[in-house]
Amino acid sequence: MSDPFTPEVVAAIMRHMNCDHADDCRVIVRGLGGQPGASAAAMSGMDADGMDFMATVDGAEVPTRVPFTTTLTERRQVRAEAARMYREAAEPAPPPRPSIKEICMDQGHTHVEK
């Protein structure tokens, strides 16, 4: 299947993301792109399967790819995927779950092996 996004459409989406959502791009590459130390990021491209960013990490530019959850077929899907990416990237990591031993100890059970 060919890419449904023409160069003109990709350029328009990039302009929008980089002008109106520059900080969101940084959040996305930090949280989903494997670049937690990114100080900045700009969208550099996309296709039906994901967005490309240029992240700034320790003063160096690092190409970063963040995949979509599904292959996109229409332009209107891009907004929903970008919003999902931001929400997922911005969510704090859940706290670690306590072990069974820790739960038992917290409940006063002293017969738990250490």
Image: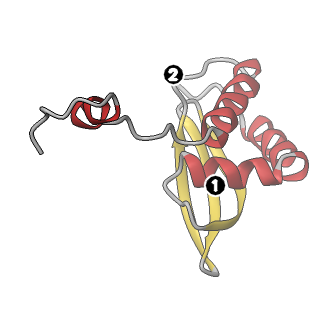
Percent position (x, y) of residue 22? Answer: 81, 53
Discs 1, 2 touching: Cβ within 8 Å: no
Q: Earlier in the sequence, mark 1 or mark 2?
A: 1
Q: Is residue 55 left or right of residue 102?
A: right
Residue carrying label 2: 70
Percent position (x, y) of residue 53? Answer: 63, 54
Residues 45 and 25: in front is 25
Residues 101 and 19: in front is 101
Amino acid type indicated by mark 1: Phe
- Label 1: few (<14), some (14–19) or many (≥20) C-alpha neighbours in 10 Å: many
State the SS at label 2: loop
How is colour applied across the structure in the image?
Answer: secondary structure
Percent position (x, y) of residue 35? Answer: 53, 60
Q: Is residue 72 left or right of residue 6?
A: left
Residue 28 is tagged as none
Percent position (x, y) of residue 77? Answer: 70, 20
- Asked if residue 81 is positioned above or below residue 13 in the image, the reply reads above
Residues 98 and 20: in front is 98
Residue carrying label 1: 53
State the SS at label 1: strand
C-alpha span from label 1 to label 2: 18 Å
Image quadrant assignment for residue 58:
bottom right
Which part of the image, by quadrant, shows the C terminus?
Answer: top left
- Asked if residue 101 is positioned above or below residue 62 in the image, the reply reads above
- Asked if residue 5 is positioned above or below residue 66 in the image, the reply reads above
Look at 53% across and 41% down and name the residue there.
93
Residues 5 and 66: in front is 66
Query: Can you see residue 5?
Result: no
Q: Is residue 64 left or right of residue 112?
A: right
- Asked if residue 50 is positioned above or below residue 63 in the image, the reply reads above
Look at 78% across and 46% down and name the residue there.
14
Amino acid type indicated by mark 2: Thr
